[in-house]
Image: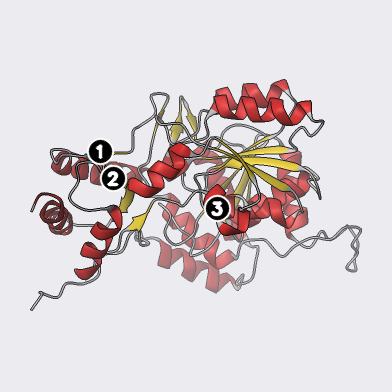
Amino acid sequence: MTEQYSRIFLSPPHMGGQELDLITQAFKSNYVAPLGPMVNAFEKDFAEFSAIPHCAALSSGTAALHLALRILDVGAGDVVMASSLTFIGSVSPATFMGAEPVFIDCDTHTWNMDPDLLATAIADYAAKGRTPKAVIATDLYGQCADYDKLQALCDTYDVPLIIDAAEAAGARYKDRHAGDAGFCSVFSFNGNKIITTSGGGMLCSNNAAVVEKARWLAQQARDAAPHYEHSQIGYNYRMSNICAAIGCGQLQVLAQRVEQKRSIFEHYKRVLSRLEGVSFMPEAEYGRCTRWLTVMLLDPAVCRCTPEELRLALEEHNIESRPVWKPMHMQPVFADCTVYGGKVSEELFHTGLCLPSGTALTGQDLTRITTLIEDALDG
């Protein structure tokens, strides 16, 4: 009989110790609905940590991206170009606005949006009189896209650049924090992210007017009046004061969590790289990746099993792993959308597997995981 172990999740929440005290403070203040002192504090603390001066705490990263596109007045028939190798929440807000997504493949050395393909795509659509209304570049698995190259391309055509930094809190691009670029950036604090607010997001910008507009829209676009007056349609997208209290506590340990994630990655790489056909997500020379998730590639020409077979083998031992994001251009819902490139992200999807990367993993947990992988690949 297989020995029973407690489940190892892919990337579970990891509390830092102060969250419960801060939640208690929020309860005692009776600010238990959206907005309140903890929301203000979380926005201030995140702005200080990231050095992005203006931040609005919201109900999710998807909500933040929706607001960004609304502020840019994206509408029916507009073109929005986006990374193909990403989570659907990076793209679905464009469809909320009635826009047409156009997908851009990643490159092999960062796994993020390929600037050369973006240059071709923008030029093609501009020549047809359909210059994109926005470009959304995802920071994949905690690694920043090449902001400067993408910004230069967007500036040539006066196209706003939005950074989807949902997976990249704590990452660095050159000497800047992730998301410190473009028209604005969005972050996610979902339960599986490097820090969490249970559920939540942030819209950040160097432009105060952008964030003020986002706050207004996120609070039902209520106009200044003693009664409820509305000249535009808004949303209920603000973060709960209770969730923000969790965020304040989590932000205190973000730098530590980055180091823990990177240490987990180095352990996997050190132990498993000796296996034939095994490689790992590269780190861009221009930045510092958080390694939110450790991603391993299996060369089908030499490996004894596929990523899916390995995933199932780990699952038999109560260990969660996950395929690399299925590219958006391969998703049935986007079957009719245009893609530039596609082969790189398709190859990563077919050969990649995300390994357990929770920052509470013990040395014993990591040994258990790597031993099972070695048995499956090198038996």
Residue 350 position within the rendered picture, expressed as x and y whole percent measured from the top left: 37, 48
User: For the residue marked with disc 1, what is the amino acid?
Assistant: Ser
* Of pointers 3 and 2, the one earlier in the residue sequence: 3
Q: Residues within 10 Å of mark 3 (few under 14, many from 20)?
A: many
* Of pointers 1 and 2, the one earlier in the residue sequence: 1
- How many marks can you see? 3
Residue at mark 2: 296
Q: Nearer the viewer, residue 48 or 318?
A: 318
Query: What whole-number distance in Å separates the C-alpha atoms at marks 1 and 2?
Result: 6 Å
Q: Which mark is residue 279?
A: 1
For the question of whether residue 170 can be seen, the reply is no
Compared to 14, does 275 lie above or below? above
Residue 58 position within the rendered picture, expressed as x and y whole percent measured from the top left: 62, 57
Q: Quadrant of residue 115?
A: top right
Q: Nearer the viewer, residue 92 or 24?
A: 92
Q: Residue at x 72, y 47 (%)?
A: 100
User: For the residue marked with disc 2, what is the amino acid?
Assistant: Met
Disc 1 to disc 2: CB gap under 8 Å: yes
Report helix, strand or loop for mark 2: strand
Report helix, strand or loop for mark 1: strand
Q: Residue at x 29, y 41 (%)?
A: 262
- Which quadrant of the figure contains the C terminus? bottom left
